[in-house]
Image: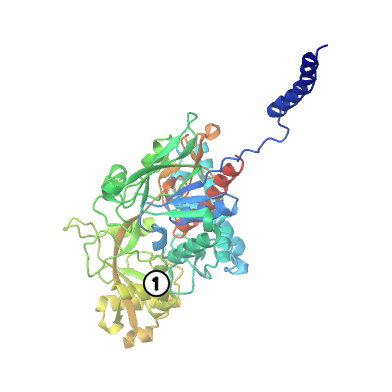
């Protein structure tokens, strides 16, 4: 064998196994470089009122990696921040122990009774009735935990008052001067900033214009316009969506005109802005009770701008604490009846529509006891010029006689001809009225559009449905989409109880947040 051939055999013997091992290692790596997992999407909340804030905080507490809260207004809070009467709850730590059972049981019945024929009408299908009853049960059964949720965050809700349509006092507010809506919204915002840190982002002046869906019809995210005027930029964001954009009582020439043209010309507590219901309809959401619009009986007529279309609410708790309503110096109805009945009683009286604005000339009167009990609210209303103080002797004789008659009713000397049984903290005596030196607070009020009971059909899990309310076993949810607050329908029926607006925002906002977070976590 030649030396050259021997060298070739040696090289072949060494090189081939080496290259085989090298090739094997290159193609059969035992410890591959781990790939980075795709970041989980945020929970997207549309609308920064109380429902949106409750949903955002609950989503974070339930493990959502992040939350993006999109609000079309320049500031958060929506109409929730204006709420002045309080939030319902039963039974809670602030109610008399001896009455807790009755308070708890009666809350469901009061809510059902207020829902009227849409719940209990003879022609209501059984499946639709059951659907509405499930929503009412969820609202009332979770009301105590909603109060606990807020109190544990630091909200003072220690004062409990009776509102119209309620069998027992169950509407909670704080003992200080801050109205309950502002107190709750501010606390939640601060808590989100504190707990959310890098996980929570609030984007204002951001209007969602479209829900993005996949081929399967499931909601995948939103398209929104950011900025003002011509500078708006369209952007997209992907993740499960919670819709909490509120009602349409201020959409005078839009949805309100479409569903309740008879309310044209009524003033409102809500700012003029279009309802967002069409965005939900575009992805298959069904709407229900859209013609069910609540007229609040008492919105202040500001002496400085009596023709103003947007008015401050004269909180229902003013009547709950003892305040009375007069027309031409006389009482005309039970002030603690449901909002619907009190509003109808006022609107049955001669009104003033000469200027194109439909309003009435009703006087709200509070004595020193009621004034003191509602001091936080009254101080603000006095500062705004919506209430004024007058000595009893400065009132006309008709008003003085009415106040005297009411004082006798409160004392139990005579029965109230209108059936009022609770008188709050009214304290004026017959002697003080005759002396005339005590001061009462007087303001002009009128009915106003306030709340819309109609909206997207949803269930007790806060899922938005493609099926109509009451389709029973055919109930179909739109994947990736939840809703809470005034944008939803089917809960209140004919009429909403005072104090249940804030409550539904917390109850169903929390449910929606937890559900959406679970959707993200399982991916």
Q: Quadrant of the C terminus?
A: top right
Q: Would residue 18 be seen by someone viewing this image from the given angle?
A: yes
Q: Which residue is mark 1?
A: 377
Q: Would residue 285 be seen by someone viewing this image from the given angle?
A: no
Secondary structure at numbered mark 1: helix
Residue closest to the eye, 275 or 290: 275
Question: Compared with residue 366, is residue 244 higher up or lower down, i.e. above or below?
Answer: above
Instruction: Please give the name of the residue rendered at 33% of the width and 82% of the height, measured from the top-left corner.
Output: 439
- Could you say where residue 319 lies in the image, as x and y percent from the top left? 40, 68
Q: How many marks?
A: 1
- Could you say where residue 53 lies in the image, as x and y percent from the top left? 48, 56
Residue 365 left/right relative to 19: left
Residue 226 left/right relative to 95: left
- Residue extending furthest toward the front: 3
Q: How crowded is the residue under tag 1: few (<14 C-alpha within 10 Å), some, or many (20+)?
A: many
Instruction: Please give the name of the residue rendered at 43% of the width and 62% of the height, measured from the top-left corner.
Output: 164
Q: Quadrant of the N terminus?
A: top right
Instruction: Please give the name of the residue rendered at 49% of the width and 57% of the height, measured from the top-left corner.
Output: 503
Q: Identify the image quadrant of residue 73.
A: bottom left
Colouring: rainbow
- Could you say where residue 185 lies in the image, as x and y percent from the top left? 46, 62
Question: Compared with residue 79, is residue 514 higher up or lower down, i.e. above or below?
Answer: above
């Amino acid at each position: 064998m030649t030396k050259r051939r021997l060298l070739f055999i040696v090289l072949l013997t060494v090189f081939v196994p080496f290259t085989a091992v090298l090739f094997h290692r290159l193609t059969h790596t035992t410890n591959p470089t781990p790939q980075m997992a795709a970041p989980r999407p945020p929970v997207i909340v549309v609308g920064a009122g109380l429902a949106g804030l409750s949903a955002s905080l609950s989503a974070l507490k339930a493990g959502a990696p992040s939350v993006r809260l999109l609000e079309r207004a320049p500031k958060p809070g929506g109409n929730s921040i204006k709420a002045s009467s309080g939030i319902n709850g039963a039974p809670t730590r602030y109610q008399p122990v001896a009455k807790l059972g009755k308070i708890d049981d009666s809350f469901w019945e009061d809510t059902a009774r207020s829902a009227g024929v849409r719940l209990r009408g003879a022609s209501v299908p059984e499946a639709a009735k059951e659907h509405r009853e499930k929503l009412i049960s969820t609202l009332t059964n979770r009301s105590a935990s909603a109060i606990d949720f807020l109190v544990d965050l630091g909200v003072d809700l220690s004062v409990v008052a009776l509102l119209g349509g309620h069998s027992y006092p169950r509407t909670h507010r704080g003992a200080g001067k801050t109205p309950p809506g502002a107190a709750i919204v501010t606390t939640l915002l601060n808590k989100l900033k504190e707990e959310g840190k890098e996980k929570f982002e609030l984007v204002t002046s951001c209007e969602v214009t479209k829900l993005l869906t996949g081929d399967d019809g499931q909601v995948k995210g939103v398209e929104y316009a950011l900025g003002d005027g011509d500078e708006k930029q369209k952007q997209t964001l992907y993740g499960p969506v919670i819709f909490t954009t509120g009602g349409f009582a201020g959409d005078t020439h839009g949805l309100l005109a479409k569903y309740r043209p008879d309310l044209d010309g009524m003033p409102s507590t809500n700012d003029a802005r279009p309802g967002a219901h069409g965005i939900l309809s575009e992805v298959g959401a069904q709407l229900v009770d859209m013609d069910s619009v609540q007229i609040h009986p008492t919105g202040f007529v500001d002496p400085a701008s009596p023709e103003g279309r947007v008015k401050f609410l004269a909180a229902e708790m003013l009547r709950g604490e003892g305040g009375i309503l007069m027309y031409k110096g006389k009482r005309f109805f039970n002030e603690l009846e449901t909002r619907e009945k009190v509003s109808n009683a006022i609107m049955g009286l001669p009104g003033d529509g000469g200027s194109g604005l439909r309003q009435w000339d009703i006087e709200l009167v509070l004595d020193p006891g009621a004034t003191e009990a509602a001091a936080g609210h009254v101080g603000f209303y006095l500062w705004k010029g919506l209430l004024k103080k007058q000595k009893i002797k400065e009132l006309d004789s008709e008003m003085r006689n009415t106040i005297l008659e009411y004082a006798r009713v409160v004392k139990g000397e005579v029965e109230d001809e209108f059936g009022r049984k609770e008188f709050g903290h009214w304290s004026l005596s017959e002697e003080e009225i005759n002396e005339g030196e005590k001061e009462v607070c007087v303001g002009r009020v009128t009915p106003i559009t306030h709340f819309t009971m109609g909206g997207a059909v949803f269930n007790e899990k806060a899922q938005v449905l493609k099926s109509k309310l009451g389709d029973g076993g055919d109930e179909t949810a739109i994947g990736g989409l939840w809703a809470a607050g005034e944008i939803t329908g089917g809960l209140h029926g004919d009429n909403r109880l005072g104090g249940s607006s804030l409550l539904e925002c917390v109850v169903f906002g929390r449910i929606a947040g937890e559900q959406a977070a679970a959707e993200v976590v399982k991916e």
